[in-house]
Structure formats: C-alpha cells, structure tokens
Amino acid sequence: MKISQIAQILEGTFVTGEELSDREVYSACGSDMMSDVLAYVKDQGVLITGLCNPQVIRTAEMMDMLCIVFVRGKTPTPEMVELAKQRNIVLITSPRRMFSACGKLYSAGLQSGAF
Amino acid sequence: MADHVHLEYVVEGDNFVSAGSATESVKACLKGMGVKPEDVRRVAISMYEGEINMVIHANGGKATADIYMDKVVITLADTGKGIADIELAMKPGYSTATDDVRSLGFGAGMGLPNMKKYADECLIESTVGVGTKVTLVTKFSA
Ligand SMILES: Nc1ncnc2c1ncn2[C@@H]1O[C@H](COP(=O)(O)OP(=O)(O)OP(=O)(O)O)[C@@H](O)[C@H]1O
Ligand SMILES: [Mg+2]
C-alpha cells in the first residue's frame, strides 16, 4: 500500500513528507508505548500512535520506519516536524481513533507483520 | 588508517528532546561504513534503550562506541543511583519508572531484556549510589 492511500483511508492530513507519499509500505504497528514498539516491532514501515513527543520520531528512526500516523487529531510540534524532515519520515495526522485507524488499514490489506 | 573508529557522547539527563541523538549518530556512522541494515538496527535498538535509561533513570552520562571491522562495542556509563538488584531489573515488565515517564511512552520494563536480546553480549555493572555501566557488544553478521 502506498503512503498516500493510508492518508486517504484515514482522512489524514500530511504534516510533512507528502512528496514521499508514493513509497510502498507493507505492514504497520499501533502503539502508544515506545517501549513496546522497540521490543516487539520487526519490519513494520508504519507506526500508528496517539503519543505525541520527540521520542516517537526517534523510535521510528531506530526502527527504520517510513511513516508515522498520529490518531485522535494529535498534531506534532514544530520540533518534531523538524526531526522528521531531517530523517525523511512522513508525518500524517488523522481524526480517527486508534482502534478504527488500525481496523481500517488492516481491512484495506495492510499487514500487522507480527502476531 | 586507525584500526578502529572511536566515538564519544555526553548524554544529558532528563532531556527528552535530545535523548536518542547519540544512538542516531552511531547508527548513521555504521550505515555510512556499509554495515548491514539488520546489524545497524540491532545496535540502534539496544543502544537507544541504554541511552533512554540513562536519561530517565540516571540523570544522564557518557556513551562511547568503538567500531571495528567485525563488531561494535558500546558503553553507557552514568553516575546515577545505580541498580540494587540487576537480576530483578532484567525481568521483563520490571520497572521503577514514574507515571510521568510512562506518559511519555516508556517504562514498560522491556529495555534491559531488549538489550540482552539484540546485543551479542550485554554486561551490566552497577553499584548503588555510584552508578551503572552497560557494555554492549554486537558482532556483524557475515
Ligand atoms: N542506568 C540506570 N540507572 C539506574 N537504574 C536503572 C538504569 N537502567 C535501568 N535501571 C532500572 O532498571 C529498571 C528496568 O529497566 P528497563 O530498561 O528494563 O525498563 P524501564 O526503563 O523501566 O522501561 P522501558 O525500558 O520498557 O521503557 C528500571 O525501571 C530502573 O529501575
Ligand atoms: Mg528502559
């Protein structure tokens, strides 16, 4: 699935990285705990989260993720946007809640990449 | 050419914005040297866990990375409160993190087990009231 489709499905808005929205991603992970992302994530290209602080961007970078979706309308700070820009990470904000965001992407064919 | 690359960083305590920057710098260096992405990620995850621990539990410290042809040795040393029972601290789910730290997305008690999982060697030395030193050795896959 292209990143642009993720934005479309979640009625999301690009905060940064729209020019990278042609990139393909195959699996995603939804979590508000960065500890769990670090402990359980394998090759997921997308992080869906309700947490909004600079360590979300750092965590995604450590895991080589391409895109972060902030649910519940969370808007990243300018500091976070700058960190994401430097790392070519796409940021999307969506009005959806975590459960429905994950559900919609899952039924559209995005894999969890883990059990 | 020197026989290996030595890098050093000061990690600021309780700074939740800069936390992770030492790890990112090492990650970029390894990537630039052509180390395999899987190996780079293993190093990044284990070092980041250690760096975050220094920031949230130990008021910061010093990180070093020594990169050789076949491995990288990371050390994370602090002069924080130390760990009284290392075996207990290594248990998945054990955490003394405050609600404040949890609200920032950390404190699941997964950091030390995760470091052990991703590094080939993980040595934790700690003295209560003196500080903690973590040494992580990651060998590059063939
Ligand atoms: N550098 C350190 N100095 C003092 N105590 C530490 C240090 N590193 C870890 N600890 C102690 O060991 C416990 C377990 O550490 P671990 O990294 O596994 O979990 P955590 O940091 O609490 O949560 P997580 O890593 O999942 O975000 C910590 O809660 C803390 O009490
Ligand atoms: Mg930790």
Image (cartoon, grey):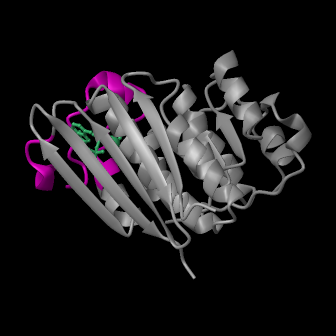
Rendered residue at 79%/33% (across/down): A11
A94 left or right of A60 in image: right
A83 left or right of B118 in image: right
Rendered residue at 72%/48% (across/down): A66
Quadrant of the rendered image containing residue A73: top right
Quadrant of the rendered image containing residue B114: bottom left
User: The N terminus of chain A appears in which quarter of the rendering?
Assistant: bottom right
Using the rendered image of the protein, determine whether residue A75 is visible from the camera's viewpoint: no
Tell which quarter ligand 1 is in: top left
Is residue A99 or residue B119 the one in the foreground?
B119
Quadrant of the rendered image containing residue B30: bottom right
Is residue A69 or residue A78 the one in the foreground?
A78
Residue B29 percent across, percent down from the top left: 63, 51
Q: Residue furthest bottom?
A: B142
Rendered residue at 67%/57% (across/down): B31
B55 left or right of B44 in image: left
From the image, give the main secondary structure of the stretch colored magenta.
Answer: loop
Q: Residue furthest top?
A: A78
Using the rendered image of the protein, determine whether residue B124 is visible from the camera's viewpoint: yes
Residue B35 percent across, percent down from the top left: 63, 66
Residue A34 percent across, percent down from the top left: 46, 41
Q: Magenta span has B88?
A: yes
Rendered residue at 58%/60% (across/down): B2
Residue B131 percent across, percent down from the top left: 19, 36
Q: Magenta span has B117?
A: no
Q: Count how many numbered circles sit on residues in the image.
A: 0
Magenta residues? B83-112
B102 left or right of A72 in image: left
Is residue B15 or residue A60 the one in the foreground?
B15
